[in-house]
């Protein structure tokens, strides 16, 4: 497959601004990123490169800093092999080992998650995913009905299943993610996970004990009303994909109005995850 690279440079872009820009580029088809001095490189299949879409992303995500870009066509190569050579497994809280299919297993920890990440989606390395995994390890999931919104590879759903959840529903709007969940649940022998294509409309009428939502602030705000409806009384909501400031305060305000009461939060490199409980 032929790829193009887009080289982004800036003299005044903060790390958190770069993270948000990368997140938005990922939403429009850029699947691999590389840090460089004063910027980063984003890679996309040449057939999917749309300059107008790129300009729209930049217009929406570059308030307060300047950014310049240069597009280059690059020679074909084995992208999966290149990506795999730069990917390393991780350990979360000394309890959970997350590895890809091409890594050796780790038998000394209580939990192991094996995923085939397909280059584009979460492997646990991002701060938000790591914190959400930590929340799952800290809390009781036994016998609970769990909903994983924006599931990606299904990594959170898989750990919830391994923590003895009764049922797990994994939802994503991307067909590749849904297919990835189906593949990864087999790799981890957690066949009770159900995956569905869609968004908040998919969960209408459901009733769950736990919601895991690692998405972004705007989507979380949009979906909170539905979360409050499907979450049972005293149910737990874990959210991530946003910054501690100003996002947490905004989300807390919306959640409180829906009876979802803030309990605590985690912060890792400015990224934030938070726990809420439904009280009414």
Image (cartoon, grey):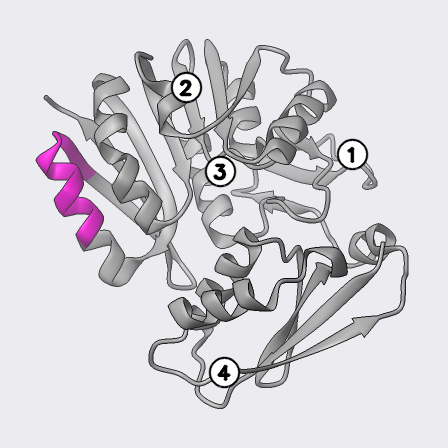
Q: How far apart are the two marked residues, 4 and 3, measured between alpha carbons?
A: 34 Å
**Point 21% across, 47% down: residue:** 251
* Residue 70, position as x, y percentages in the image: 66, 81
| Label 4 or label 2, whichever comes before in sequence order | 4
> Is mark 4 in CB contact (under 8 Å) with mark 1?
no
First in residue order: circle 1 vs circle 2 = 1
**Residue drawn 83% across the image and 71% down it:** 74
Q: Position of residue 235 (x, y in %)?
A: 25, 21
Q: CA distance from mark 3 to mark 2?
A: 14 Å
Residue extending farthest to the front is 52
Mark toward the viewer: 4 or 1: 4
Query: Is residue 60 at least partly visible in the picture?
Result: yes
Q: Residues within 10 Å of mark 4 (few under 14, many from 20)?
A: some
Image disc number at residue 12: none
Q: Which residue is mark 3?
A: 133
Q: Which residues are magenta?
A: 250-262
Numbered disc 2: secondary structure: strand
202 on left or right of 125: left
What residue is pinned by disc 1?
A: 105
Q: What residue is shown with label 2? A: 146
In this rendering, the label closer to the viewer, 1 or 3: 3
Quarter of the image holding residue 229? top left
Location of the C terminus by quadrant is: top left
User: Horizontal placement of 195 versus 259: left or right?
Assistant: right
CA gap between label 4 and label 2 equals: 41 Å
Q: Nearer the viewer, residue 48 or 14?
A: 48
Q: Which residue is mark 4?
A: 67
Give the CA separation, mark 1 to mark 2.
Answer: 27 Å
Image-quadrant location for residue 132: top left
Report the mark closest to the observer, 4 or 3.
4
Identify which residue, 102 or 107, lies in the foreground.
102
């Amino acid at each position: 497959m032929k790829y193009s690279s887009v080289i982004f440079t800036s003299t005044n872009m903060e790390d958190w601004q770069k993270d948000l820009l990368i997140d938005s580029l990922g939403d429009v088809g850029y699947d691999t990123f590389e840090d460089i001095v004063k910027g980063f490189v984003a890679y996309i299949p040449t057939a999917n490169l749309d300059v107008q879409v790129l300009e729209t992303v930049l217009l929406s995500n570059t308030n307060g800093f300047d950014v310049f870009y240069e597009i280059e066509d690059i020679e074909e190569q084995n992208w999966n092999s290149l990506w795999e050579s730069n990917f390393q497994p991780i350990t979360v809280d000394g309890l959970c080992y997350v590895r890809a299919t091409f890594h050796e297993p780790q038998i000394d920890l209580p939990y192991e998650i094996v995923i085939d990440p397909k280059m584009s989606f979460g492997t646990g390395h991002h701060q938000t995913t790591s914190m959400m995994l930590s929340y799952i390890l800290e809390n009781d999931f036994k016998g609970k009905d769990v909903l994983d919104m924006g599931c990606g590879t299904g990594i959170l759903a898989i750990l919830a299943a391994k923590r003895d959840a009764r049922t797990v529903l994994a939802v994503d709007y991307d067909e590749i993610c849904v297919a990835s969940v189906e593949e990864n649940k087999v790799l981890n022998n957690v066949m009770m996970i159900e995956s569905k294509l869609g968004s908040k409309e998919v969960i209408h009428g459901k009733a769950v004990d736990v919601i895991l939502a690692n998405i972004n602030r705007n989507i979380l705000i949009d979906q909170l009303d539905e979360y409050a409806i499907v979450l049972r009384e005293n149910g737990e909501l874990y959210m991530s994909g946003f910054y501690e400031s100003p996002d947490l305060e905004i989300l807390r305000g919306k959640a409180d109005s829906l009876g979802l009461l803030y309990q605590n939060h985690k912060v890792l490199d400015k990224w934030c995850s938070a726990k809420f409980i439904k009280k009414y």
